[in-house]
Image (spheres, grey):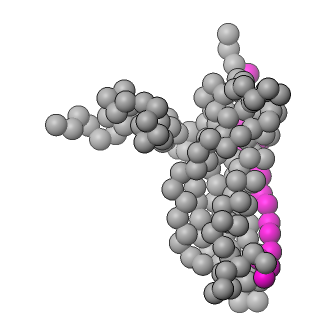
């Protein structure tokens, strides 16, 4: 049976937050845990928009903090589904920090999160196929299978020799 298809652009979410004193550490920078919370919420909304289901976070890939985000900065998060599998969805998220008085805006974070759609009993449920349209969406879609296999290998859920996309990427290693 063919899965329903849904454009990845339909899952796009833009969220904006102001960094307040309660969000910061003793150096007046946004706390990493608070940033990860915001990223998880934004990405979850994208996954829900794509699946029209309850979603749970399955994994977060490599969140690195490139630049500290200062107290008073405006944080903008943008996410959308890159690809879906049977019940899981990969979501790409970018985070920018803007200092309005100085007129500066920097990209501070980028990550991929994976969500699983579940029914009311918490069991995984099928989601629509994600359809990319722009060149950027196609590039993210094409890389999603490699990233998924890497996550599965690192999580111990796939044997390295089964990761055919990764083998193709690195060639046969002796």
Which residue shows up at 66% across the image and 40% down it?
115
Q: Tell me if 109 is positioned left or right of 102 in this view.
A: left
101 or 31, nearer to the observer? 31
Which residue shows up at 53% across the image and 44% down it?
139
Q: Position of residue 20 (x, y in %)?
A: 80, 79
Examine the image and state in which quarter residue 98 appears: bottom right
Q: Position of residue 159 (x, y in %)?
A: 37, 30
The magenta stretch spans which residues?
4-21
106 versus 46 height, above or below: below
Examine the image and state in which quarter residue 4 appears: top right
Q: Position of residue 145 (x, y in %)?
A: 49, 35
Specify the farthest residue to the top: 1
Which residue shows up at 76% across the image and 89% down it?
101
149 versus 27 height, above or below: above
Q: Tell me if 77 is positioned left or right of 157 in this view.
A: right
Specify the farthest residue to the left: 174
């Amino acid at each position: 049976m063919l899965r329903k298809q849904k454009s990845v652009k339909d899952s796009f979410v833009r969220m904006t937050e102001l960094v307040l004193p309660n969000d910061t550490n003793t150096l007046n920078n946004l706390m990493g845990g608070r940033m990860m919370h915001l990223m998880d919420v934004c990405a979850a909304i994208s996954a829900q928009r794509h699946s029209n289901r309850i979603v749970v976070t399955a994994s977060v890939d490599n969140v690195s903090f490139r630049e500290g985000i200062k107290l008073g900065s405006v944080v903008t998060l943008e996410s959308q589904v890159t690809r879906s599998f049977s019940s899981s969805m990969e979501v790409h998220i970018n985070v920018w920090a803007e200092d309005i008085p100085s007129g500066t805006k920097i990209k501070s974070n980028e990550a991929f999160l994976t969500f699983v759609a579940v029914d009311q009993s918490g069991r995984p449920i099928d989601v629509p196929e994600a359809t990319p349209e722009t060149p950027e969406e196609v590039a993210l879609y094409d890389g999603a299978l490699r990233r998924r296999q890497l996550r599965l290998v690192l999580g111990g859920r796939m044997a390295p020799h089964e990761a055919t996309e990764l083998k193709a990427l690195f060639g046969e290693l002796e």
